[in-house]
Image (cartoon, rainbow, N blue to C red):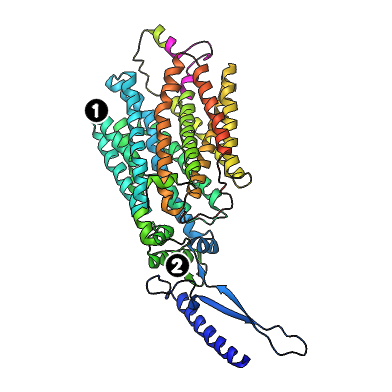
Amino acid sequence: MFNSLRNRLAKIKHKEYDNIDGDSNGQGHTAQGDKTPNSQEDVCLETFSPKAEGTEDTQELRPVSDTFTVEQAVDAIGFGKFQVKLFFVAGLAWVCDAMEMMLLSVLGPALRCEWNLQTWEEALITTVVFIGMSISSWMWGSMCDKYGRKTTLITSSMFVFHYGLLSTFSPSLIWIWILRGLVGFGIGGAPQAVTLYSEFLPSTFRAKGLVLFEMFWAAGTCIEVALAVIVMPTLGWRWLLGLSSVPVLIFILACLWLPESARYEMTNGRHDVAYAIIERIAKDNNKPMPQGKLIHAGSVNPEQVEVKRGRVQDLFTPDLRITTIILLGLWFSSSFCYYGIALLTTELFDEENPCYSSVGQKVQESGCFLDCKMLTTKDYLDLLWTTVAEFPGQIITLLAIDYLGRKKTIALDFFVFSVFVLLVCTCPSRTVLIVFIFVARAFISGAFQACYVYTPEVYPTTTRAIGLGVCSGMSRIGAMITPFVAQVLLRTSIYIPVSIYGGISIVTTIAALLLPIETKGREMKDTH
């Protein structure tokens, strides 16, 4: 009887090894026509034969799984040349986004002087961009989950390039509003570069990789200011708009190399394509391909996922509802405080003693409500210096996010920001004021980055892009509101806007600690 059992096991094992060899040659990995992973042909039955003295050989069967998921494959292959190339290609989208945002701080003053704009007309140039972004963010996120990350990034970038270049030839303020609003509509898709990049990172490197990815934002703002220093004094704002569109075109061309997300392909039922993408990663990284059959991490039907993918209501299912609500608040506060401190910086530096005077009083005393002041080289250098303050915040977040965890890092960043922004109320000297503002700017930048790390990790593949898109849209609402606090209320009293920013950041600190899920060391899920 034992001899008969040995012969049967040998046949099964020989057949299974043949299947494994076929998979290692790129065959036998597709879902179509294959048996389920739990079938006999997907399990290798190994034997071991402990000998007891004076007895015959005994055998015991031990099942060993012969399958792997995308997450397991990416972790097994590890970080390498593929991720480095993806880092720079996807990061270029972030550079383009930052340049278009920083452009607004230069374009407004230039048009105010050239076209004799009123204050609200100048402010509306910035507002229409954020309106476009808030409207489109959820749409690009939904499109990303339905039609793919790569397709969405290319489409949104073409929007930015086309209307950004057209705005160079704007004949009037109305056309500037329209075309820059359409540019903002396209920029709403830029955060999906984070979604794509995060899905190719090994779990042990994901947090650090995403924080490093945010360095491209600071780099983009520095590039735009440096470009303005060279172009604005001689060529003017039209050339600045045109040259600022060039990196977008470069990114569109670079997208020809960009792969689609293997996670997206798996949830879409295209296992062949997902397997080929993983093979590409392994080849670039010079690592062996995992042995076995690629399977879906969840137990859902891919056809059902196709129907339900990219729906906003999926963010409010019982297991995600509280997380989504808190995240919307975190993203609103991040943008509200980040752009607020940026606007406060130039306003406060313009005052000899901001505690005892206000911008409103200064303008009224001068008798000129259209105080036209072209930005000088010193102004551009001040903008550059303010931007550099973000790098220390990014480094601190990079060091803390894997040590403290995502929730505590976000809470710490908001708390430190609240302390230093409230210290502005102590009427410090200009030098001390610069220190307070720069520390506040560094930590609110870090909080924003930590949100970009946490959000893609907490949502499954089927709702990851729409989740990031909706959160990004909420952040744009905060950006639209903050000028009325940082600029309008500042004309009444410095204590009002500073207290608002400090109070909101303290509330957000508590909210971050109440997040129900800590994603540190947690695998990114493909389904609920």
Using residue 219 as the reference point, say whether residue 311 is left or right of it: left
Please name the amino acid that badge 2 sits on.
Answer: Glu
At a point 49% along the width and 39% down the height, the residue shown is 327
- At label 1, the amino acid type is Ile
Residue 95 seen in the current view: yes
Categorize mark 2 by other alpha carbons within 10 Å: few (<14), some (14-19), many (20+): some
User: Is 357 a magenta residue?
Assistant: yes
Question: Alpha-carbon neighbours of circle 1 within 10 Å: few (<14), some, or many (≥20)?
Answer: few
User: In the current view of this chain or complex, which residue is farthest to the right?
Assistant: 53
Does dot 1 land on a helix, a strand or a loop?
A: helix
Res 246 → quadrant = top left
Q: Vertically, is 463 above or below 129?
A: below
Q: Where is residue 271 drawn, in percent x and y?
A: 40, 66
Residue found at the far left of this picture: 171
Instruction: Indicate yes or no whether the magenta region holds residue 250.
Output: no
Q: Mark 2 points at which residue?
A: 279
Looking at the picture, does residue 298 appear above or below residue 192?
below
Q: Is mark 2 on a helix, strand or loop?
A: helix
Q: Nearer the viewer, residue 158 or 247?
A: 158
Task: From the top left corner, tell me how far across and down residue 509 is, in percent.
Answer: 57, 33
Quarter of the image where the N terminus is located? bottom right
Res 359 quadrant in image: top left
State whether residue 453 is above or below residue 69. above
Name the N-terminal-most of marks 2 and 1.
1
Q: Where is residue 229 in the image (x, y as percent from the top left)?
A: 40, 31
Residue annotated with mark 1: 174
Which span of residues is magenta-colored?
345-361
- Is disc 2 in contact with disc 1, using a CB cutoff of under 8 Å? no
The label on residue 58 is none
Q: Residue at x 35, y 45 (%)?
A: 140
